[in-house]
Image: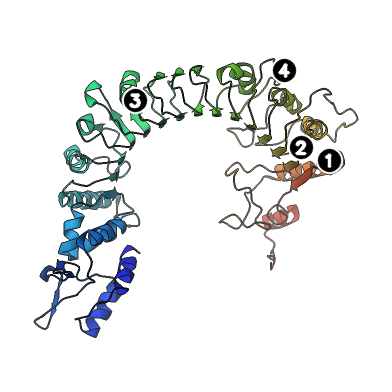
Amino acid sequence: MGLLALRRLMATQPHRRRRRRSDAQAQARNGVITSMAKRKGTLLQGGDSSSQGGKRLRYSGPDLPEDIWRHIHFLVPLRDAARAACISQAFLRSWRHHPNLILTKKTMGLEHKAYRRVGMARDFTSTVHSILKNHSGIGVKRLKLDIIYDHRNLNICYLNNWLQIAITPGIEEITLLLPSKYTFPCSLLSGGNGRSLQYLKLVSCAFRPTASLGFLSSLTKLHLCEVRIKDDELTCLISNSLALKQLELLNCRQIICLKIPCLLEQLSCLNVSLCENLQMIESKAPNLSTFSYISNLVVELSLKQSSQVKTLDIDCYDESNFLCHVITKFPNIVPNLETLTLHSIDERINTPMVASKFLHLKRLEIYFESLDPDKAFPLEYDYLSLVSILDASPVLDTFILCIQQGEMKHDSVFGDASNLRTMPGHKHESLKDVEIIGFCSATSMVELTCHLLENATSLEYITLDTICDVDDLEDIGRCCATNLRKTGECFPLRREMILEAHRGVMAIERYIRGKVPSKVELTVLELCTWCHDLERLDALDKGKLITFPTS
């Protein structure tokens, strides 16, 4: 596509053709630019010509300055830029200063190769070596090198040479997916090489920065994934990166105590995920506003000097009663919180009433999930007890509750609805938008919904979705209604879940719809009538012929 766009641009310029008709047709079929070298205001050079019948054929390009051609060359995809450099002396000169070196299987056309992985690794190595050998190393702004999966046995000397060529003064972005045995040479970022660096992402390697690394004065984003780096080494690195705005750590197992110094006045976003040996996070960054944490346990968290945290997303996927822990501890840890997202897999203690409040919390999302899709959420948990966290959030505007239901084993409202509980005195005057995903016929869920309708005095919208798509919560489409899915069908559900979804709709009609105030808009999302029709599914199980709908 890059060469096609380049040829279209050339076609808009006035020029003469000096090729035979058959040559022009052949060149067009092959998508080749035959001549783009500059001589006295025109691009024609012997190195760009071809011969036929003893005659040298040349191509006269438009009259453009060389710096414009270089800019055009830099804009086309890497593979096309390399091809153009192979047939044009002018583009070969600009290739040696190409700013974007994106060296992956895709950019080099190797992702669809059918031969063995060994052959692909050999071709990848040969191609990268050739590209960098012909590059001057001057002018590189962006480097991406992906050799993490198919090139584990790559000669380290090759890799060292490649990085030495590409990482030069002026580089701004570095993304390296490296073999796990490799130790990134920090000396490459010392001196002038690291001063212009704005983005650094390292995946699957060792990284041992020391004080000799010096200041990375322009670094704003740092992403370390499966990187072997220790506490003091990370502290040394970020302490020399005073412009840092985003820090992301994923599966860095050697980190035990993460300390963010107060020197990082620009740091606004911190993401820490799956660092399984981490025990403490202490941040003194004064302007930290977004914090995301995923782990199998609750770490000791100190954000008192990061009082500006406004967005918090926490998922402790192996921690029981996490919701109870949050409501009792976090109002004092993050007093200015405005958006809170919580993920829990095991709540056996009802959410308690507390005196501490989230005084600024406007958006609350709670996800009750399960590592086992067939496992029901604990029977001990009472959904109505969520009123306590709503009470602790006096300015809450939006509340989203998502329950990943396995087989629903809570007491059903159809068993005994004669004495539905109420909680008078608990008003939620700011709540405007409520969404419950995975709504079922559990008595306590019906009670929670009725409570919100009766006590959220500013409520405008309430959405009750009777299914919960565990694969993609942002795309819960019904194929017959929205056709959002690429597969053309809804996510498959077990028979028990389909039956429970129908019971959820019945509970809405019987116990909830009549309590919806006239000013509140109720939306009920039911099962797809095609993908989850029980008669059709039974027929498919028995091998009967099914006629698809025509519209």
Disc 4/disc 2 C-alpha distance (Å): 22 Å
Label 3 to label 1: alpha-carbon separation = 53 Å
In the structure shown, which secondary structural element does the residue marked by tag 2 occupy?
loop
What residue occupies the far right of the structure in this picture? 418
Which callout, 2 or 3, points at the residue further toward the start of the chain?
3
Amino acid under disc 2: Leu
Q: Quadrant of residue 160?
A: top left
Q: Which numbered marker is on residue 459? A: 2
Three-letter residue code for mark 3:
Ile
Q: Dot 3 lies on which element?
A: helix
Q: Quadrant of the N terminus?
A: bottom left
Inter-mark Cα distance, 2 to 3: 45 Å
Q: Which mark is residue 444?
A: none
The residue that mark 3 highlights is 238
Q: Amino acid at mark 1?
A: Val
Check if mark 4's residue and mark 2's residue have beta carbons within 8 Å: no
Q: CA distance from mark 4 to mark 3?
A: 40 Å
Q: Quadrant of the C terminus?
A: bottom right
Could you tell me how far apart the alpha carbons at marks 1 and 4 are, in whole angstroms?
26 Å
The correct choice, above or below, for 103 with respect to 251 in the image is: below
* Residue 40 drawn at (x, y percent): 13, 69
Provide the residue designation for mark 4: 353
Amino acid type for the residue under numbered disc 4? Met
At 69% from the left and 63% from the top, the residue drawn is 546
Colour scheme of this structure image? rainbow
